[in-house]
Amino acid sequence: MKTSKFLLLLILLSACLALRSQSVEPATIEISFYGNENFSNNELVENFKGCFGQLWQKYDELAYNYIAQKCSRSLLQSKGFWKAKVIEINSTVRDGVRAVQIVVDEGPRYRIGKVEIEGNEVLSKNEILGMWGQHSGEVADGTKLQDLVYEKLKEKYDDLGFVHYNADFEPDFVEPRGRRVDGLVNVTITIDEGRQFKVRRVIFLGVSEEEEESLRKQFLLKSGDLYGTRKAQNALDALNETGRFVPVEVNGSNVEIRSDEEAADIDLAIILKRNVP
């Protein structure tokens, strides 16, 4: 009996010691950057916190690493440091404070050199460069170039009916000859425009023939129009605003896009469900 009580006390004592040994997340987190020469610590920290929102107040190694790779590198690259890297993230706890140090390697800064554009027929080189908004000799903003290739040009070509647009860019670095000298980055943008698609017909399912005919007349996207994702969504938004049907989205399950690759035509089948009062 005494042995059983003694074992029970040992178990309880061990449990208490285990609970006391568990680390409690400090209420204060101090973030700093190391290795930065052209950016102030405050600028990098504010950018990091701005990307993270309130979540930075709870330390998570994977989340911190993701934000550093995504946002901190993006800031550095936007200022011409295209080869910037986040080397590592170190975390230590002392006197109730978690100190997080983000180690970066800025690398050299680059300016824009030669720019070549290949595969473009619909848009001229000058039009594309105008959308970029940068010129040779300027500090190369890597984020602006990514925005041009993957966002602006994609939207522009989509509006013109080139729904299969695809593009990428290849940087060719000319390294600086000295520590305080900028390098050059020559850029080649390669574009695959694809074919230009038009709307062949728009079909409304779930309504009577008479109502379908009325909807087709009111729908902003007509047979023969150049097809574009944004155009289709704008037309659907106008339909949604009537409040007569459950809202539909161009990428939703209630919209079927049927493409004829050979004829470069698009059929739009829209499944409608009435709103129940």
Image (cartoon, grey):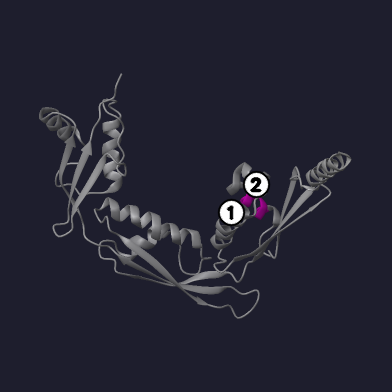
Q: Which residue is mark 2?
A: 56
Highlighted magenta segment, given as a residue range:
43-49
Check whether the beta carbons of the residues at disc 1 and disc 2 lie within 8 A of each other: yes
Disc 2 element: helix
Q: In this view, which residue lies farthest toward the bottom?
A: 177
Give me the residue at 39% from left, 60% from top. 149
Give me the residue at 17% from left, 32% from top. 215
Task: Give the image location of residue 19, x and y in percent.
Answer: 78, 43
Residue closer to the observer: 270 or 199: 270
Height in image: 155 above or below 210?
below
Q: Quadrant of the C terminus?
A: top left
Circle count = 2
Write down the quadrant of residue 231 in the picture. Answer: top left
Residue closer to the observer: 270 or 12: 12
Instruction: Find the distance from the CA under tag 1 to the CA under tag 2.
Output: 9 Å
Height in image: 189 above or below 208?
below
Task: Give the image location of residue 246, x and y in percent.
Answer: 30, 30
Task: Give the image location of residue 7, x and y in percent.
Answer: 83, 44
Task: Tell me which label, 1 or 2, sits earlier in the chain.
Answer: 2
Query: Would you say the magenta stretch is mainly helix, strand or loop?
Result: helix
